[in-house]
């Protein structure tokens, strides 16, 4: 039996992260096994926000259309202000891991709650620090929750996507 785990891909822009998710969706991969985490905005004079309207996420501002579209594909959208990282938007199963880390006050050896949640998913601590750094630098983290077969499918589909890093 394959053991569930998580792997991560870092994309420098929201356009590349969104395209990777769309490629996986088109290939038939279960997008409920994906999480996306990213700051997704830069300082601007226009407000940026997200809210729910019925069962749909509504968004506005520079990154609003991107996150609104992603939240239409993935589930469990959330936005958190994480000390040391900033305002972070996310969607997918990772949200539950982060909430568990926050509720349990799980912080592992100098990493944030975000890092603790990544560690709980099975990512190595040295990689977690790299991913936190990537998020601080406005990159996007695509997490794949699944088994070895899921990971092989994702690697195959994303072979041409050129993420900055994969683990």
Image (cartoon, rainbow, N blue to C red):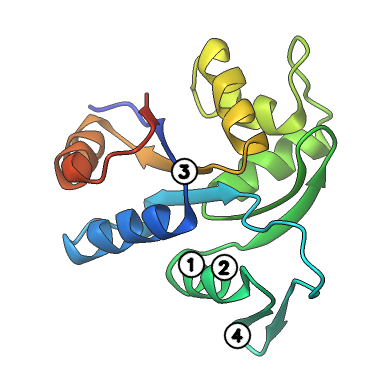
SS at mark 2 in the image: helix
* Residue farthest to the bottom, as pictured: 54
Residue in view at x 59 percent, y 62 percent: 76
SS at mark 1 in the image: helix
SS at mark 4 in the image: loop
Identify the image quadrant of residue 118.
top right
Badge number at residue 163: none
Q: Nearer the viewer, residue 1 or 126?
A: 126
| Residues under numbered marks 3 and 1 in contact, where contact means CB atoms less than 8 Å apart | no
Residue at mark 3: 12
Sequence-earlier tag: 3 or 4: 3
SS at mark 3 in the image: loop
98 with respect to 153 (left or right): right
Q: Quadrant of the N terminus?
A: top left
| Residues under numbered marks 1 and 2 in contact, where contact means CB atoms less than 8 Å apart | yes
Residue at mark 1: 70
Task: Please state the horizontal and vertical placement of residue 92, each as a whole percent of the image.
Answer: 52, 54
| In this view, 26 is above or below 160 | below
Badge number at residue 55: 4
| In this view, 35 is above or below 10 | below
Which marked residue is nearer to the observer: mark 3 or mark 2? 3
Q: CA distance from mark 3 to mark 4?
A: 30 Å
Estimate how packed mark 2 is, as few (under 14), some (14 to 19) or many (20 or more) residues with alpha carbons within 10 Å. Answer: many
Sequence-earlier tag: 3 or 2: 3
Residue at mark 2: 67
Q: Quadrant of the C terminus?
A: top left
Q: CA distance from mark 4 to mark 1?
A: 14 Å
């Amino acid at each position: 039996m394959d053991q569930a785990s998580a792997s991560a891909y870092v994309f420098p822009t929201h356009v590349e992260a969104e395209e990777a998710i769309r490629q996986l969706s088109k290939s038939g991969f279960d997008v409920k096994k994906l999480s996306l985490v990213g700051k997704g905005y830069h300082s601007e004079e226009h407000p940026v926000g997200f809210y729910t309207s019925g069962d749909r996420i509504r968004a506005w501002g520079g990154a609003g259309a991107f996150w609104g579209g992603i939240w239409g594909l993935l589930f469990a959208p959330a936005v958190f202000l994480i000390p040391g990282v900033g305002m972070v938007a996310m969607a997918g199963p990772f949200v539950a891991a982060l909430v568990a880390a926050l509720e349990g006050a799980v912080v592992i050896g100098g990493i944030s709650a975000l890092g603790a949640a990544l560690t709980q998913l099975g990512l190595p601590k040295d990689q977690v620090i790299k991913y936190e750094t990537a998020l601080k630098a406005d990159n996007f983290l695509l997490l794949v929750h699944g088994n070895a077969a899921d990971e092989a499918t994702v690697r195959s589909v994303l072979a041409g996507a050129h993420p900055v890093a994969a683990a």
